[in-house]
Image: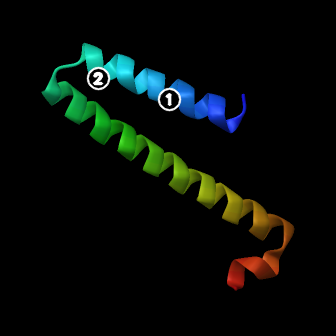
Amino acid sequence: MNSCEWTVSVTALANVLANSLSDEKLELAAALFTQLGDTLATIAVQRSLCSRSKTNPQAAHN
């Protein structure tokens, strides 16, 4: 899937969720997905840093 297809898919999913959830549940879903995205980004950065330090031990100290 290219980047345009990804954004169209995410937008479609957001519209489906928005149409099927109450305002209160939609707010909660938005907060949960934001936290999920932030946590996944944190894990991805941590993995990247750990893999760099394994391949280049000096990078861990810089």
Label number found at residue 10: 1
Does 55 sit left or right of 2 as displayed?
right
Query: Residue 34, image x and y in percent?
Result: 37, 44
Q: Residue at x 76, y 79 (%)?
A: 59
Q: Quadrant of residue 9?
A: top right
- Residue at numbered disc 2: 18
Label number found at residue 51: none
- Quadrant (top left/top right/bottom left/bottom right) for the N terminus: top right
Asked which secondary structure carries label 2, the reply is helix
Q: Earlier in the sequence, mark 1 or mark 2?
A: 1
Query: Residue 46, image x and y in percent?
Result: 60, 60
Q: Residue at x 71, y 77 (%)?
A: 60
Q: Residue at x 84, y 73 (%)?
A: 56
Q: Which of 38/10 is in front?
A: 10
**Residue, far bottom:** 62
**Looking at the image, residue 62 lies above or below residue 54:** below
Count neighbours of disc 2 (C-alpha within 10 A) and say few if under 14, some if 14 to 19, many if 20 or more: some
Q: Which of 8/51 is in front?
A: 8
Q: Decide: marks 1, 2 in contact (CB < 8 A)? A: no
Does 41 sit left or right of 30 as displayed?
right
Asked which secondary structure carries label 1, the reply is helix
Query: How many numbered discs?
Result: 2
Tell me the distance, in whole angstroms, between the alpha carbons under discs 1 and 2: 12 Å
Count neighbours of disc 1 (C-alpha within 10 A) and say few if under 14, some if 14 to 19, many if 20 or more: few
Residue kind at label 2, given as amino acid type: Ala
